[in-house]
Image (cartoon, rainbow, N blue to C red):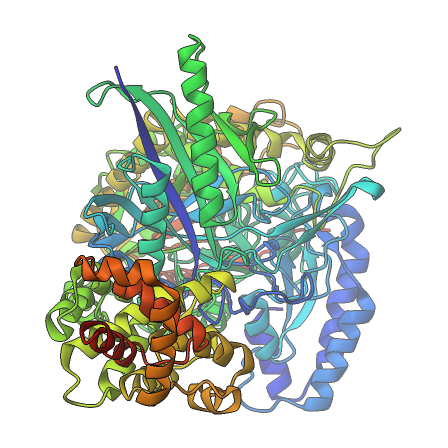
Amino acid sequence: MTLRQIQELYRQKKATPSEIAETFLRHIQQREPKIHAFAWFDAGQVREQAKELEKAGPSGGRPLWGIPVLVKDNICVRGTPTTCASKILSGFRPPYDATVVERLKKAGAILLGMANMDEFAFGSSCEHSCYGPTRNPWDVSRVPGGSSGGSAAAVAARMAPAALGSDTGGSIRQPASFCGVVGLKPTYGRISRYGLIAFASSLDQIGPITRTVEDAALLAQVMAGRDPRDSTCADLPVPDYAQSLQQPIHGLRLGFPKEYVSEGVDPQVRKAIEEALNLFRKLGATVREVSLPHTEYAVPTYYIVATAEASSNLARFDGVRFGHRAKSGSGSQTLQEMYTRSREEGFGPEAKRRITLGTFVLSSGYYDAYYAQALKVRTLIQQDFNRAFEQVDCLVTPTAPTPPFRLGEKLEDPLTMYLSDILTISINLAGVPALSLPCGFTPSGLPVGMQLIAKPFAEELLFRAGQAYQGATDWHQREPKL
Amino acid sequence: MATVTVIGLEVHLQLKTASKIFCGCSTAFGAPPNTQVCPVCLGLPGVLPVLNRQVFLSGVRVSLALGCGIQPRIVFHRKNYFYPDLPKGYQISQYDLPLGMNGFVEIPSGKKIRILRVHMEEDAGKLIHRPEEGSSLVDLNRAGVPLLEIVTEPDLESPEQAHEYLKTLKGILGYLDVSDCDMEKGSLRCDANVSLKEGAAAELGTKVEIKNLNSFRAVARALTYEIQRQGKMLQEGEKVSQETRLWDDAKGITLGMRGKEYAHDYRYFPEPDLVPFAVAADGIEEARASLPELPAQRAERFARQYGLPRPDAVGLTASRSTADYYEVCAGRFPAGKGQAGQKAIANWILGDLAREMNERNLDSIEKLKFGPERLVELVDLIDSGKISGKMAKEVLVESIQSGQAPGAVVQSKGLSQVSDKEAIRAAARAVIQEQPKAVEDFKQGKNPALMFMVGQLMKKMKGAANPGLSQEVLKELLENR
């Protein structure tokens, strides 16, 4: 069921929030043991929320009344364990809601639980979790992508009709692509980050993961807009996305960045994108080749900026005020020992790797060579996009260079793992919005995703193009056999 | 060759905004531990800072009052280090683009002390150590209280100059009303950098930073100690090492800090959670226009308007409350008394009132419970001949102690001055009888002898004689002998 379908059932009084909740609880009961998409879950709380909504009734102004939504484990929900899938946050229950959670609750959503992820969103496979890996519903020997792997897998497996993810370098789009669902990375500043446990503050954005573009637009509508608690959240009006969905794409100028096929993209993926472009042409859009010349520098630039910010953002996990603190062994321990041991025990290997990298690139003597240089290249990458958007309205690329890979396949090789974000990280560096949507399957039945990119705050265009594409295809209606 | 002392001061000023720099928590001093905290200043995961506009506005006022240029684009940086009083593991501060730059403070001796920078940052919390339990507690009420850091160039050459600078700076800050400037409560804190060099032209020596300076007096004492310590080391051919030392006020010495405190690499980088913003030029001009009259300008006006000598004008205007006090007195002074009366008021404030404040350890004339109307009353009592200047000093002390008005003190103590010419003449005759030597001296033309006899007369009359009249009567009797 999509959000629109659930809303239609409610409108026709054919279902109650409790009945809808029970449907998803049943799916969770059946499929979660195989998929392992949840970091935290309490069926009792889900039922309670549904009952309360029923009692209040579908009064006006609550656009998500009775809609179950799964929340990624790095987005704070008051009183609920929010741990970033990290041992260092074990036992942490935030005394506040993230702004997006507050808005979902106010809109009448039912919170389904917390979704598994790569620890602190460091990863592209959902294998770096203190709760163990999540599996891809299309092939449980494969990864769901990451870091929002739990969110995407749950939506694909019909355990949730919608989920929230966060995207720092592809963490919404790549798992959406791997799981055959829709994922939106909004413009930097479109949705408040208040309550999102920061990975890289200048890159992070919260976004929806759904089955249809229409549903993504519905969730974005509720979450977007100014938040006085986040200075980086833009004070710009939010357009009526539902209306833009209806607009035709005739005359829409699409661009295909040539650098995005030379990057070792799998032939099956390339074929799916070519077919998608053909379809867009049929729908009345024009397609031309464009260039984003600094694409090859995106990966190193990203891993300097993102790790630098992460090394600082993760300093607060020190065992002093919350989360994991190492027990003092025999006798007392010094402050230094408490810090070192708490962090050593609390962080997983990938988190340690990134903190170390980030600390290094900010160190005196290296700052200019790495961090300062990366900021300059970041500007060049932004300019690439500005120039491209002078020529076209929307860019079309594959979301990931390959279909989902096998569990363990890249775990021991961080560099190869980092390259699976190669087509998504430039978007975060540039701060522009991008949407991933299913555009085909490999012969072995693995989903392939397409990425649409627009200029800042032009989410409308993405929804319009995505909606037109989904209106003409049925990839998003396919269901994994579970 | 003579050794030259080079001192630079870093002042941390807590701004008295109602709320903290990045959240809405109260900044009030002295609340029970961890009662003025929220997820933001506790550094909980996921929360974000939002700049308190008032902090920026106060920062601009201070920068402008210190003659600084204002940075056209405001950027914050993160200063990264681990300490339990620093909840986020970094302090949000300013780095290479401070709010204000290149100003100066002119100290009373006329020297201009250059101000290198004024920047905004957040304060850290406080640790409460419990050695008997082998633990430490963290109080984060202070975490996120707004600070301005005001850094001088190394322009100060002596502990006295450092003291003068701090007093002048505090005076200016008092006029701006942006901080309590109370060192005891920690709302004004000072670190000093000091080094010695051989001769004025030589390169700077090795710098030592002194922390834990809790009063202006401590700053001067610590610098004096440190200059002697370093001087002795250099004389003995030892090398001064670059380090941070703590002032021990009880022992009167500085002590090297253990460990590698100064080997920090703070890994500064631009704070991504706060968006840089441009400062509007007309906004700065507006702020400049709204600055109050500052001590230097006010001193100039006092000299002009009240005909005061420059040192008096500077002394009166160093603190806003003293200057306001003076102006109330000067305004209420009966017309026609002219500049002599206004000078007399200045003398009282800078002399007796200042001494009474010092003795009571008061930092503001308002706390002296002797308002300007009382000083006017006191001076009126003298001018109308009711009491002598000498008696007035006693009346002042009594009035401050008892809280009674000067007139009431004179009445209740029966201190009224004797202006009865006959009573004075009788006493004068007695003095002339008792002091033949002085009489002889007077006849020889030695004028001090007359003053001596006036003093004797006063003593006889227990200070109650009108001094002018006494002199007149004595002179008359002596000359008519």
Q: Is A196 on the left or on the right of B329, as rendered?
A: right
Q: Is residue A1 above or below residue A350?
A: below
Q: Is residue A8 above or below residue A330?
A: below
Residue placed furthest toward the top: B237
Residue B312 % position (x, y): 23, 63
Q: Is B69 on the left or on the right of A473, as rendered?
A: left
Instruction: Name the residue: 32% across, 77% down.
Output: B325
* Residue A401 shows up from this direction: no
Residue placed furthest toward the left: B304
Q: Is B62 on the left or on the right of A132, as rendered?
A: left
Residue B447 % position (x, y): 20, 61
Residue A234 % position (x, y): 36, 65
Q: Quadrant of residue A460?
A: bottom left
Instruction: Name the residue: 58% across, 28% down.
Output: B257
Say which quadrant the N terminus of chain B sits in. top left
Depth order, front residue of A334/B372: B372
Residue placed furthest toward the front: B481
Residue B391 % position (x, y): 41, 77
Instruction: Name the residue: 67% across, 90% down.
Output: A57
Depth order, front residue of A415/A243: A415
Q: Is residue A465 above or below residue B256?
A: below
Say which quadrant the C terminus of chain B sits in. bottom left
Q: Is B428 on the left or on the right of A356, as rendered?
A: left
* Residue A199 shows up from this direction: yes
Depth order, front residue of A137/B305: B305
